[in-house]
């Protein structure tokens, strides 16, 4: 049940200020330690890449993870950069270039980028979603929901960025601060009142979201991930928490009360604390009535609502989405009505149901052992005893080889039948990858497993094996629309191939 006196976050004034292009104005946004050369300059662009530097541009020398951007200062100057922002001034200064020394170039870049683009985030309702899983699903579905509710809105996600229905390819879960502010300014110019974005832990550490004004933040959950980058789980948690800590007082900080880290995330935050739960905690609560292959049935707001999404983790995503929409001032009943009709994010536990045989196809991005186990466990929880699970899965080439036997083991053990196949073999021989996968299949499960290198044939075989009512899981590629072989990205869409096979085989 949800409290009725929910706070409403009023729509800010959306009048777009002209973009600031004078260096002095940009510098006022940062903390400058030292400065050489003129500051009364007209700035036409900002860049963090020396290769993009040119007359009129400010080049930011960032201390990167692989290389130190300071080594590219000379290159940027040679290309005509008007200004260099750096943490260490070069020994030799070019008289035609202005130099600005700051304590942290990435942080200065974020504040200056926000200023350069006229602080678009202050003129819209910006909601950031963080957590190990569920970011794409929540951000994408919030975008769909608010479109259905009649708003112009933006989306920044791993799968794609969007301005209303216009798709802008995405390179990162959260882009760098310059691109991010540029995209937000474009969204504002297109009339967007709401923007939903994923906030990755990398983005927090690298100051990609510093200087943004969030209306709210959402925390989904936290599990072991990205330790290659953060080093320890504690650092990973700190990165997520910093996003919540930096939220302004006016923002809501909506957290999953049932996650082990849900409460920690909210400790000492300035923003208003809100929680969602399936276990009776916080403001936004639901009760799970049914978790079946055809969708979730929840009691929410004292109402029983049927949703099209599958799996308990999606009940959490739905609560996060619902809570966010209500905190943004939307009518709870209207939100539930629209939400109940929405489908998942592309390639995130996306169902493709066959017409005749009512076979449930599931296309999911699971491409790690953890994710595959999670998906197969979810399917095991919701299926009827008569429903078989047939899994199609492969492992990428020229990437972590250690996961190959484990992915095959999980598919073999947690499904009735498994078809091992290719998933972006890149420059490796697909048969070598498959041979490594096969080593993980327990002897007792060998009879359940087929190996077919051609992914189309593998999907066809899985569909042919399926009996009416069965479940065919096609794992690994999700929203991807290509199969990468020897440097060429060939068109391939699991969802489309699955649909074709249902038709071709009359299922
Ligand atoms: C590990 C990581 O996060 N890297 C990001 C980081 O790059 P970096 O620090 O490694 O850059 P670098 O290659 O060491 O170069 C250092 C600096 O020199 C500059 N440079 C470099 C070469 C040159 O000729 N001239 C030049 O000026 C670079 O622009 C950079 O500023 O900063 C760059 C600019 O913002 C990012 O594009 C880059 O993302 C790389 C491509 C990446 O793959 N990042 C992933 C890990 C990532 O960020 N993922 C998260 C999602 C994670 C998840 O939840 O799944 C994301 O938000 O996308
Ligand atoms: N709330 C959740 N809890 C646990 N697992 C989830 C949750 N939401 C989605 N998943 C599972 O994790 C996968 C990734 O989901 P999603 O893309 O929404 O997460 P993400 O945080 O954006 O991760 P990534 O950045 O890797 O895409 C889904 O395909 C699904 O199998």
Image: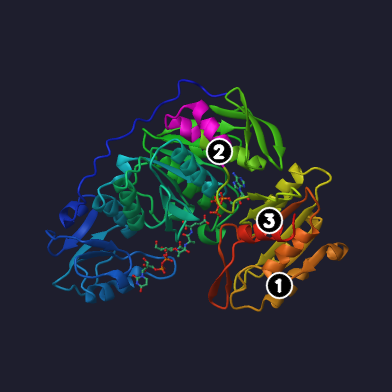
**Which region of the structure is painted magenta?**
323-342
Sequence-earlier tag: 3 or 2: 2
Q: Is mark 3 within 8 Å of ligand 2?
A: no
Q: Residues within 10 Å of mark 2 (few under 14, many from 20)?
A: many
Q: CA distance from mark 1 to mark 2?
A: 43 Å
Residue at the disc numbered 3? 372
Sequence-earlier tag: 1 or 2: 2
Q: Judging from the image, what secondary structure is the residue with disc 3 in?
A: helix
Circle number at residue 453: 1
Residue 316 pos. (x, y %): 60, 38
Q: Residues within 10 Å of mark 1 (few under 14, many from 20)?
A: many
Task: Tell how many labels.
Answer: 3
Answer above or below: position of 315 versus 420: above
Residue at the disc numbered 2? 262
Decide if residue 403 is in sight here.
no
Name which residue lies at 47% across and 30% down.
Answer: 326
Answer above or below: position of 507 versus 191: below
Q: CA distance from mark 3 to mark 2?
A: 24 Å
Name which residue lies at 36% across and 37% down.
Answer: 248
Is 222 left or right of 61, judged from the image as shown?
right
Q: Nearer the viewer, residue 396 or 236?
A: 396
Q: Magenta stretch: dominant SS? A: helix
């Amino acid at each position: 049940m949800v409290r009725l006196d929910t706070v409403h976050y009023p729509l800010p004034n959306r009048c777009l200020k002209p973009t600031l292009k004078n260096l002095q104005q940009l510098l006022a946004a940062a903390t400058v330690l030292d400065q050489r050369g003129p500051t009364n300059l007209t700035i036409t662009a900002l860049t963090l890449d020396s290769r993009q530097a040119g007359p009129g541009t400010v080049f930011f020398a960032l201390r990167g993870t692989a290389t130190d951007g300071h080594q590219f200062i000379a290159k940027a100057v040679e290309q005509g950069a008007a200004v260099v922002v750096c943490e260490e001034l070069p020994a030799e200064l070019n008289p035609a270039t202005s130099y600005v020394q700051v304590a942290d170039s990435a942080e200065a870049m974020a504040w200056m980028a926000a200023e350069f683009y006229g602080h678009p985030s202050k003129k819209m309702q910006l909601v950031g979603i963080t957590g190990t899983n569920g970011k794409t699903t929540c951000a994408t579905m919030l975008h769909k929901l608010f479109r259905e509710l009649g708003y112009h809105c933006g989306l920044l996600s791993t799968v794609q960025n969007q301005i209303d229905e216009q798709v802008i390819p995405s390179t990162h879960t959260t882009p760098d601060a310059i691109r991010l502010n540029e995209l937000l300014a474009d969204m504002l110019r297109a009339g967007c009142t709401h923007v939903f974005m994923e906030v990755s832990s990398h983005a927090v550490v690298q100051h990609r979201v510093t200087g943004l004004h969030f209306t709210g933040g959402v925390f989904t959950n936290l599990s072991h991930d990205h330790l290659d980058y953060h080093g320890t789980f504690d650092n990973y948690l700190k990165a997520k928490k910093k996003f919540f800590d930096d939220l302004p007082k006016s923002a809501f900080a909506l957290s999953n009360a049932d996650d082990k880290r849900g409460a920690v995330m909210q400790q000492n935050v300035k923003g208003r604390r809100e929680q969602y739960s399936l276990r009776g905690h916080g403001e936004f609560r639901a009760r799970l009535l049914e978790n079946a292959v055809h969708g979730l049935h929840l009691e929410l707001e004292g109402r029983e609502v049927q949703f099209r999404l599958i799996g308990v983790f999606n009940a959490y995503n739905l609560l996060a989405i619902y809570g966010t929409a209500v905190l943004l001032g939307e009518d709870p009943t209207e939100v539930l009505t629209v939400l109940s009709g929405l489908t998942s994010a592309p390639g995130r536990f996306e169902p493709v149901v066959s017409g005749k045989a009512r076979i449930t196809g599931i296309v999911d991005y699971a491409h790690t052992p953890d994710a595959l186990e999670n998906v197969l466990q979810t399917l095991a929880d919701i299926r009827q005893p008569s429903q078989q699970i047939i899994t199609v899965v492969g492992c990428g080439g020229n990437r972590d080889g250690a996961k190959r036997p484990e992915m095959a083991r999980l598919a073999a053990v947690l499904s009735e039948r498994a078809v091992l196949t290719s998933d972006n073999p890149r420059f490796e021989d697909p048969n070598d990858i498959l041979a490594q996968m096969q080593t993980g299949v327990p002897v007792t499960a060998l009879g359940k497993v087929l190996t077919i290198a051609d992914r189309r044939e593998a999907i066809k075989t899985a569909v042919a094996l399926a009996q009416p009512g069965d479940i065919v899981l096609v794992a690994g590629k999700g929203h991807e629309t290509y199969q990468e072989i020897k440097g060429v990205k060939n068109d391939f869409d699991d969802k489309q191939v699955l649909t074709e096979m249902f038709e071709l085989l009359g299922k």
